[in-house]
């Protein structure tokens, strides 16, 4: 199951010592269930703040956010958050880290371990199930975190620059895996990135936020990620791919 996200008249100011810092301004946005929305924009424009508000970690100064038609008033199991730095419990092995979400929902041991194994297989970590997080590479830890979030079966997955700290090869591999997961599960995903290539390659819809206070200044449906018939190299070689990245780059530069 997936849910839509409705944002109406959203604005936010942080109160700082020197006065109010406007972070977000007049954001109106409807994300449909099952969309993979990528959000790019210059550093400090308010992307993380926006994601944290949808997650329910920060309350907006004005305006509202609804997920699946219900106003967000705090964190909830319908929204899973993937952070840039993997958040895994060091004292639990990988399988038990992934089984934690189902455990918190009261699911019995055999079933939750089976669920964990299913998601570990989906992200290619079956062989690492019995290891501790510190025994994994950065890319494997990030995969484990994604499996952990998905095992909680959230209707919305919020990803805050999850691949920013990874090397280029691992990053491309995880991008391809995310597309497979998205096509298989139909989850609603909001994915923040600094990379224009990543935004256009992954997004079924690409948003660009303006410099602070952040507003949505670019919003386009993008066809590439829904098409499973092309390889990543073929997608990146398409003239339309280059044209779309050029438009996104121009929107960020403005
Ligand atoms: N708790 C806070 N108190 C005061 N100002 C804050 C706070 N959190 C964020 N800000 C400011 O709000 C603005 C938006 O920050 P945010 O982290 O959302 O940007 P971002 O687009 O995610 O940046 P980056 O791409 O560099 O991660 C920044 O100017 C930041 O300094």
Image (cartoon, helix red, strand yellow):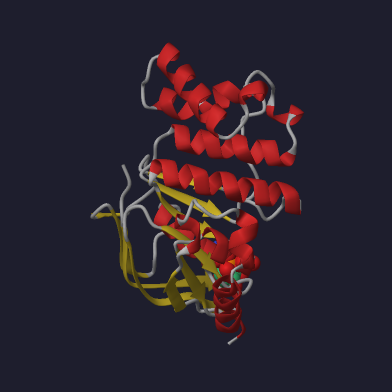
Observer-nearest of 167 and 45:
167
Q: In which quarter of the image is residue 62?
A: bottom left
Q: In the image shown, does 204 or 52 lie closer to the viewer?
A: 204
Displayed-image quarter of ligand 1: bottom right
Q: In which quarter of the image is the N terminus?
A: top left
Q: Which residue lies furthest to the top in this view?
A: 110
82 lies left or right of 141 = left
Give the residue drawn at x 55%, y 60%.
192
In the picture as drawn, the residue positioned furthest to the left comes out as: 69
Residue 58 visible here: no
Whole-percent x, y for residue 71 in the image: 27, 56
Which residue is painted at 45% across and 30% down in the image? 101
Residue 203 seen in the current view: yes
Seen in the picture, residue 73 relative to 28 is either above or below; the reply is: above
Left or right side of 37 for 134: right
- Quarter holding the C terminus is bottom right
Identified at 61% across, 71% down, the residue is 44
Nearer to the camera, 159 or 14:
159
Between residue 59 and residue 233, name the one nearer to us: 233
């Amino acid at each position: 199951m997936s849910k839509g996200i409705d944002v109406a008249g959203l604005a936010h100011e942080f109160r700082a010592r020197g006065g109010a810092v406007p972070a977000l301004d007049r954001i109106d946005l409807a994300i449909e269930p099952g969309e993979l929305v990528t959000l790019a924009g210059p550093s400090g424009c308010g992307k993380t703040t926006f994601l944290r508000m949808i997650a329910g970690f920060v309350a907006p100064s004005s305006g509202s956010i609804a997920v699946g038609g219900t106003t967000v008033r705090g964190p909830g199991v319908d929204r899973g958050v993937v952070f840039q730095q993997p958040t895994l419990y060091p004292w639990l092995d990988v399988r038990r880290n992934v089984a934690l979400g189902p455990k918190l929902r009261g699911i019995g041991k055999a079933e939750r371990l089976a669920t964990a194994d299913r998601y570990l297989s989906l992200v290619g970590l079956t062989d690492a199930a019995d290891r501790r997080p510190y025994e994994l590479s950065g890319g494997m830890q990030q995969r484990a975190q994604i499996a952990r979030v998905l095992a909680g079966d959230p209707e919305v997955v919020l990803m805050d620059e999850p691949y920013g700290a990874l090397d280029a090869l691992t990053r491309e591999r995880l991008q391809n895996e995310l597309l497979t997961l998205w096509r298989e599960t139909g989850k609603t995903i909001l994915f923040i990135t600094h990379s224009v290539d990543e935004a256009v390659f992954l997004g079924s819809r690409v948003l660009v936020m303006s410099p602070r206070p952040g507003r949505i200044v670019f919003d386009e449906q993008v066809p590439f990620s829904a098409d499973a018939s092309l390889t990543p190299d073929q997608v990146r070689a398409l003239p339309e791919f280059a044209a779309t990245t050029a438009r996104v780059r121009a929107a960020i530069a403005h």
